[in-house]
Structures are given as structure tokens and as C-alpha cells.
Amino acid sequence: MSIVNTIQEIINKIKEIYNDQKIIFTADSRAKRRFFLLAFGGLFFLNYLMFCFHADKNVFSIFPEIPKLENIHSTTLYLPSPDGKTILKEERKAGFYSSDEKYATVLFKMVLKGSRFENTSMAVFSNFNVRKIWINRGTGECIIDVEPTVLDDSVVVTEGSEELFKKSLEKTLSENIPAIKKVLLLERGVPGKSLWEI
């Protein structure tokens, strides 16, 4: 049997199946819905198999992996209190990160967010976006470039709150990352600018 005859035979069988299904579709709308449901389901499943093949992923690993306990360690946080004078201490669990810069970003956001047990939301008056973090391992200096949001005129700023935030951040970073000894905050690349103090 030649290749042409084989292809012709396959085409004829597909036509027969199509004609049979066409008769069923006109007779029964439920069969039509069932056919399309199975067809699209099979198509999506094949698409998922192709994704697994190209991403070198196990077909059965649908859910994310549970992190191992040894990949989680204790982190000490120092947080500014709303009175602008005292620093609170808290223990948190955190994962391991590929670089000190990434870990510093996570710690910065933790200090910014405040305590889980007390209402310290009024201790920080601006929601910063971290633009870039550099760590100079020779001098032990960590430079954090931030982009703060504009404060509302109705916000009453506690005296000394900005300095307390900076101290809390420096203490948190230096205690958790040995390479950091000193922290310098920049606002859009400019050092020495007041972040929110009036």
C-alpha cells in the first residue's frame, strides 16, 4: 500500500467520523456539547503537556512545593514605635535569599510594614518603593535608594520619627546581614534629604 493510499484512507475515515458526528449533532444537542467539552479539554491537556515538556517540569507537579524547614531561619527585626522614642524588637521567620541585596529588600519592607502585634502604622509616614540597593562589602555600607510617596497635608508627623525609622532599619540590617555596618538612605539618588520630617 502506497503512502498516497494510506493518507487517502485516513482522510476518508476522518470524513466518516465527521459525518457521523454531524448526524448526532443535529439529532442531540447534548452530544454536541459533550463532544466540544471533550475536544477542548483534550486540547488544553495537550497544551499543558507541551508546557511541561518545554519547561522541563513534572506533569504531576501541579501545586507549588512546600518549603523545607531548613530553608527557613529566624530574623530579628527592630521596629520604630509611634512615640518616636523607643525601638521595638520582634522575631520573625524568613527564608534564605540568593543575595544579600534581596534579603536587605525584604528586611526593609518588613520594617516599613511594622509590628504584627502592636499598632505601629503611625511610626512610618511614607510608603517607600525601593529603587535599588547596593552593599559595599569593603566598607560595610548599604545604600538604599527609595522613592517615597507624597504626604497628605492632614498627616500629623511625630517628632523624631524619621530618625527612629533610620536607626531601626540600620539595626535590623546590620544584625541580620553581617556584611552591613552602616545604612545610607537616598531619595531618588540624592543623599541627606528629609524623607518625611516637617
Image: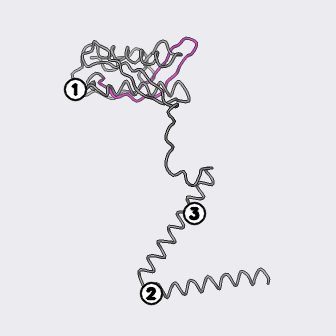
The residue sitting at the front extreme is 69
The residue sitting at the right extreme is 2
Which element is circle 1 on? loop
N-terminal-most mark, 2 or 1: 2
- Packing grade of label 3 (10 A; few <14, some 14-19, many >=20) is few
N-terminal-most mark, 1 or 3: 3
Measured Cα–Cα span from mark 1 to mark 3: 57 Å
Residue highlighted by disc 1: 153
Which element is circle 3 on? helix
Measured Cα–Cα span from mark 3 to mark 2: 28 Å
Q: In which quarter of the image is the N terminus?
A: bottom right
- Residue 41 vs 111, above or below: the answer is below
Q: Position of residue 63 (x, y in %)?
A: 49, 49
Measured Cα–Cα span from mark 2 to mark 1: 70 Å
- Packing grade of label 1 (10 A; few <14, some 14-19, many >=20) is few
What kind of residue is marked 1? Asp
| For discs 1 and 3, the disc positioned in front in the rendered view | 3
What kind of residue is marked 2? Thr
Q: Is 16 left or right of 168, judged from the image as shown?
A: right
Which residues lie in the magenta part? 124-147
Residue highlighted by disc 3: 46
- Residue 131 vs 84, above or below: the answer is below
Dividing the picture into quadrants, the one containing residue 120 is top left
Residue at image position (37%, 16%) is: 168
Q: Where is residue 12 in the image (x, y as percent from the top left)?
A: 65, 85
Q: Quadrant of the C terminus?
A: top left
- Residue 55 vs 72, above or below: the answer is below
Dividing the picture into quadrants, the one containing residue 43 is bottom right
Residue highlighted by disc 2: 26
